[in-house]
Amino acid sequence: MSVADLADVMLSTLATLADTVFRCIDCGHSFKGPRGFSSYFIELQMRSLDIQPSDSIGDIFGRFINRDISKTCHKYDGAIRREMHFNNVPK
């Protein structure tokens, strides 16, 4: 699947493909992110992803998922891990 095809699927899907949950590594406290995955197409345009013509969808998605998170746990000021929960996978 090309990047353009992936964007088309993400933009034309009425149902949210995945939800983001942030979880504290230290205490386990978690909270749901404010946006579903279907809105992340705009974020794929970020310079920090350093998208190259030779990149696969997996390369880009891996860099997107593993970006540094500036949030910290409001209970213990611990490090936060991003988790993606996929609800519906397009066919």
Image: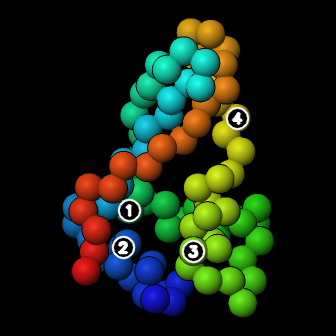
Q: Residue at x 33, y 56 (%)?
A: 86
Q: Nearer the viewer, residue 74 or 1?
A: 1
Amino acid residing under circle 1: Ser
Up/down of 29 relative to 71, above or below: above
Q: Nearer the N terminus, badge 4 or badge 3?
A: 3
Identify residue for label 2.
11
Q: Quadrant of the C terminus?
A: bottom left
Q: Nearer the N terminus, badge 4 or badge 1?
A: 1
Of badges 4 and 2, the one in the foreground is: 4
Mark 3 secondary-structure assignment: helix
Q: Is residue 70 visible?
A: yes
Amino acid residing under circle 2: Leu
Q: Nearer the viewer, residue 1 or 11?
A: 1
Asked whether the residues under the numbered discs 4 and 3 touch, taking CB atoms below 8 Å apart as contact, a structural biologist would say no
Up/down of 65 relative to 49, above or below: above
Asked whether the residues under the numbered discs 1 and 2 touch, taking CB atoms below 8 Å apart as contact, a structural biologist would say yes
Identify residue for label 1.
38
Residue 21 place in picture, x, y as percent: 43, 38
**Disc 1 to disc 3, how far (Cα)?**
17 Å
Mark 4 secondary-structure assignment: loop
Identify residue for label 4.
70
Q: Residue at x 66, y 19 (%)?
A: 78
